[in-house]
Image (cartoon, rainbow, N blue to C red):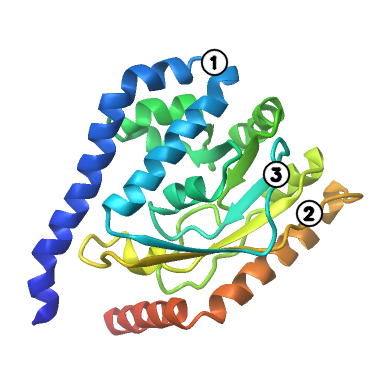
Amino acid sequence: MMKYIKMPFLLLWRIWFYILVFVTIIVLSPILLVLTSSEKWYPHFWKVVRGFSYMLVYAMGFRLKIEREEEIEKDKSYLFCANHTSFFDIWLMCVLSKNPIVFVGKKELVKIPVFGFFYKRAVIMVDRGDAESRRKVYTMAKKRLTNGTSVAIYPEGLVPEEEVVLAPFKNGAFSLAIQHQIPIVPQVYFDCKRLFSWNVFKGGPGVLRAKQLKFISTNDLELKDRRFLNKKTFDLMHNELSNDVLYMKDTNKAKDEQEKIN
């Protein structure tokens, strides 16, 4: 009974999220147009995006609990890898890094009104079904990895089903890190799936916990080592998630619901 009472409030809460995103983008659009017109302006664009991300976190009723096993250095480039369970993952990553990050994102998000216009101007877009598009990511990333700008990839490729702890990683992120000899920064998000699910009738305000794990060096590694690097990163992140009680409780709940449907 309580579940059905909460549904209208959760729907209004989600609508509030989209209002915040689209109204803010429209209000800031003159500034965003200027800051996305040239790559040299990207660090300033990042500051605006990061400030907006903080606003979005607190305006949605979330609080942050962030643990960092290692801190990033200013003016140094990294490759950020995080688990992908929610549309809120993007904003959480923006909050976690003072250094500018360029996202490698799927082409389909360009279709979102207003958001998509600036999305295609700011990210490295990839069509995961097109081999040529995937190859171009390496060239585009090389241009952006300067003056402390980093690249972020969600290595699962697509958002996995809620009952999956962590989907297998694609090798592209690790090939990129080795090619450019930049450290991998594994980040684990424990609560986005539970508090901001793709199901609009699930979730709600609460504490968003994130953990930045020790960095993984790519020094002296070659492209042939990308599968080793993939497994090492996957195992670290999977271990953190599978040992978190709240994350696993939600994952197992989703698994039980899926089994009932089948």
- What amino acid is at disc 3? Tyr
Location of residue 27 with respect to 2 vertically, above or below:
above
Q: Is residue 150 left or right of residue 97?
A: right
Circle 1/circle 2 CB separation < 8 Å:
no
Residue 78 marker: 3
- What amino acid is at disc 1? Ser
**Disc nearest the viewer among 3 and 2:** 3
Give SS at disc 2: helix
In three-dimensional space, the C-alpha distance between marks 1 and 2, rounded to whole angstroms, equals 32 Å
Q: Is residue 216 left or right of residue 25?
A: right
Circle 2 is placed at which residue position?
A: 226
Q: Decide which of 85, 255 is in the foreground and name it.
A: 85
In three-dimensional space, the C-alpha distance between marks 3 and 1, rounded to whole angstroms, equals 21 Å
Residue placed at 56% from the left, 82% from the top?
Answer: 243
Circle 1 is placed at which residue position?
A: 38
- What amino acid is at disc 2? Arg
Residue placed at 45% from the left, 57% from the top?
Answer: 159
Q: Is residue 171 left or right of residue 228?
A: left
Give SS at disc 1: loop
**Mark closest to the chain's N terminus, 1 or 2:** 1
Q: Local crowd at mark 3 within 10 Å, few (<14), some, or many (≥20)?
A: many
